[in-house]
Image: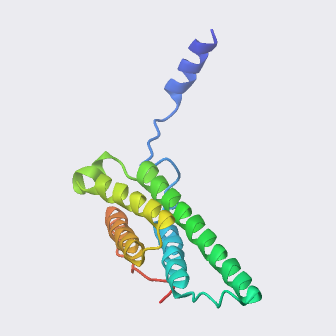
Amino acid sequence: MLSKLVKALTKRLPEVAAHCDGPCGIYDPASARVTAEAVRSMTKKILDLVPPDPSDAAATARYHNTLSRYVAIKEEQAELTKRDLLVLWTDYFKPPHLEAYPDLHDTFWKAAKLCSACKVEVSPQHADELMDAIHKIHQIFWATKNREVDWVLAGG
């Protein structure tokens, strides 16, 4: 009885279709860019740290504290970058986008793998490659909306 009522009601409702899983306007690769910039920044800061004289206990403690903070931030931001990319990949992009951009899946897969590499390593090369991948995703994303949006880096 209830199922008949639901079917009758749904027949009277207009069909609604959405391009993506959320309302339009909530997706934007900018959040991945910002967090990836933090990954790159922390990677550079880690490599720029100069270990102190081991006989200076206070300086050694400060060094280890700073290093551990930089590493924690780098890893957290790499994970946030991966999350933002995966949400964009799985929730925004649809089959018509794949037809227009046949390398879309490979682009996102490689970007997600770079996020992992940036967590595991301290590699300026991988951090730069991640930024390049996100730049490509930025271009594809905005092209799907028929818009040109400047690629602006927060860090200059």
Residue 39 left/right relative to 2: left
| Identity of the residue drawn at 45% across and 46% down | 18
What is the tally of numbered marks visible in this picture? 0
Q: Which residue occupies the extreme top position in the image? A: 1
Please tell me whether residue 72 is drawn above or below residue 60 in the rendered image: above
Q: Which residue occupies the extreme front position in the image? A: 55
Residue 47 left/right relative to 149: right
The image position of residue 22, as x and y in percent, is: 52, 50
The image position of residue 134, as x and y in percent, is: 39, 69
- The foreground one among 43 and 146 is 43
- The foreground one among 139 and 127 is 127
| Identity of the residue drawn at 38% across and 62% down | 111
Residue 131 left/right relative to 99: right
| Identity of the residue drawn at 35% across and 48% down | 94
Quadrant into which the N terminus falls: top right
Answer with the quarter of the image where residue 126 lies: bottom left
- The foreground one among 101 and 5 is 101
Q: Which residue occupies the extreme right position in the image? A: 58
Answer with the quarter of the image where residue 71 lies: bottom right
The image position of residue 91, as x and y in percent, is: 46, 49
Please tell me whether residue 38 is drawn above or below residue 118 in the rendered image: below
Tell me how the rendering is colored: rainbow
The image position of residue 100, as x and y in percent, is: 23, 55
Answer with the quarter of the image where residue 67 lies: bottom right
